[in-house]
Structures are given as structure tokens and as C-alpha cells.
Image (cartoon, grey):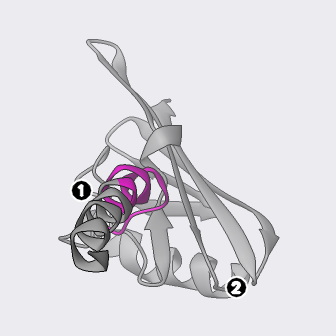
Amino acid sequence: MSRPRRLPAIACILAMFAVFVPFGPVRAADGFFSGLPDLPLMPKLGEDRAAEVVFDKPEGRIVTLTARGRVSRQAVMGYYARALPQLGWKMDRPGRFRRDGEILLLTTSGTGKDLTVQISLAPE
């Protein structure tokens, strides 16, 4: 008799897992942010899709993306300082890049144990 009771309990646990897991930080399958597909997502960072804001207007794009992970601020800034120029971005100063009339700002908060990275894109 205990076997038939286990099946509904297991099904319930699996259903709860399927419902709650997608709402946390996720890693983009192709290594890029889903809201800005030409912007790489640094390894060890998970994208927070719930915090994503994307407006695409004739005047330009306005995008805010958030990622979190166990990584240092220096590693994040170094990664994007190396990666973004290869994609045509020119660094004005650490954390600020320009390309084709757009400005990309990269800010961090928290610590290496739980670092939050926010990327903002707006027209100049």
C-alpha cells in the first residue's frame, strides 16, 4: 500500500520543482543575455530575467539587465573590458562604453559571495 502513495508525492515534488526553478537566475544557453543578444553573459553569472527591462523605440534602445554570481567585481570589470571592444564597444572609462550612438553602463553591488551586476543601455 505504501507504493501507490509515493507516486502522487513524487509527482507533487517534481511539479513544485518545475514551477519554482525557472524564476531564479538562469544561465543563457548561448552565453549571451536574452534581452540583449549581442551582449555576452560572463561565465559564473546567472541572468535575472525577472529584472529585465527592454524598450526598443525609434529614438533608440533602453535596456536594463541584471546578473548575479559568485565572482569578484574585478573579474567582471576585466571580463567586459576585454570582451566588449571585440564587439565594437569603445571604453570611455571603466564600466562605461560607447557604440553606434549608444552608451552601456556596467555597475556592480554586493560582494564576491553574491555580486549583482547591472547593465544599462541607452541612447547618447
Please check the rendered image and state whether residue 22 is part of the magenta-colored stretch, yes or no. yes
- SS for callout 2: helix
Say above or below: 57 vs 108: above
Indicate left or right for 107 with 9 as reference.
right
Q: Quadrant of the N terminus?
A: bottom left
Q: Position of residue 81 (x, y in %)?
A: 51, 77
Question: Crowdedness of circle 2 by 10 Å Cα count: few (<14), some, many (20+)?
Answer: few
Sequence order check, earlier mark of 1 and 2 = 1
> Is residue 94 among what the camera can see?
no
Please check the rendered image and state whether residue 93 is part of the magenta-colored stretch, yes or no. no
Q: Residue placed farthest to the front in the image?
A: 1
Residue drawn at (35%, 64%) of the image: 9
Residue drawn at (42%, 38%) of the image: 102
Residue drawn at (28%, 64%) of the image: 32
- SS for callout 1: loop
Say above or below: 122 vs 92: above
> Is residue 92 among what the camera can see?
yes
* Tags 1 and 2 touching, CB below 8 Å: no
Disc 1 residue type? Answer: Asp
* Numbered disc total: 2
Indicate left or right for 61 with 58 as reference.
right
Residue drawn at (44%, 50%) of the image: 23
Q: Which mark is residue 106?
A: none
Indicate left or right for 74 with 64 as reference.
right
Nearer to us in this view, 21 or 60: 21
Nearer to us in this view, 54 or 49: 49
The residue beneath circle 2 is 74
The residue beneath circle 1 is 38
Residue 72 found in image quarter: bottom right
Say above or below: 4 vs 16: below
Q: Position of residue 117 (x, y in %)?
A: 62, 61
What range is drawn magenta here? 16-27
